[in-house]
Image: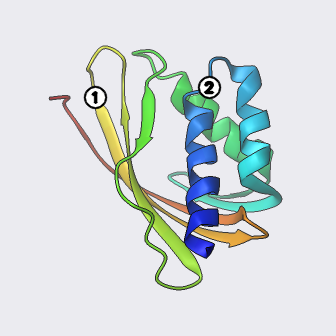
Amino acid sequence: MQEEAAESAIDMFLSAFNARDDDQVIALLSQALTSDVVFWGPLGRSEGVEAVERFVLDIRRHPAGAGTMVRCSAVDMPGEWARYQWVFTTPDGGPRLAGTDVVHLRQSRIDQMIVFVGDINPGP
């Protein structure tokens, strides 16, 4: 049951990257994250939905255009933390960004998130 809650929150978080427009990003993130979420990203630690929103919007504004973010693994929840792998692909088949996120949930929402970004690889 806890894995299903984690999967739902994670998929809602990832859907923010693929939203039709930027206005939808905050609504989707608000459904996936607690208001006091702690976010450890590539640029360090930040707090709050607004900080995560800036991160998502920056990726959506990739110079090659808004790409697609997908979860490319099952959600693994060996304890209190869940982890999954993701991939971001630009629309022109350009650079691909891949990584692993580790999240902690409180009341079925992500309250802590650690993003491990992998190498940028050329598309297939």
Rendered location of residue 39, percent (x, y): 65, 59
Rendered location of residue 112, percent (x, y): 67, 67
Looking at the picture, which amino acid does disc 1 mark? Pro
Q: How is the image coloured?
A: rainbow
Secondary element at image label 1: loop
Residue holding disc 1: 95
Q: Which mark is residue 19?
A: 2
Q: Work out which quarter of the rendered image holds the N terminus and state it.
A: bottom right
Q: Residue furthest left?
A: 124
Rendered location of residue 37, percent (x, y): 75, 60
Q: Which mark is residue 105?
A: none
How dense is the environment of label 1, judged by Cα within 10 Å: few (below 14), some, or many (20 and up)? Answer: some
Looking at the picture, which amino acid does disc 2 mark? Ala
Horizontal relation, residue 21 to residue 88: left or right: right
Marked residue nearer the N-terminal end (1 or 2): 2
Q: Is residue 64 above or below residue 5?
A: above
Q: Is residue 22 above or below residue 3?
A: above
Horizontal relation, residue 34 to residue 53: left or right: right
Can residue 113 be seen here?
no
Give the image quarter of residue 47: bottom right
Q: Is residue 81 above or below residue 61?
A: below
Horizontal relation, residue 33 to residue 73: left or right: right
Q: Work out which quarter of the rendered image holds the C terminus and state it.
A: top left
Which residue is found at the position 79% from the left and 69% from the top? 107
Secondary element at image label 2: loop
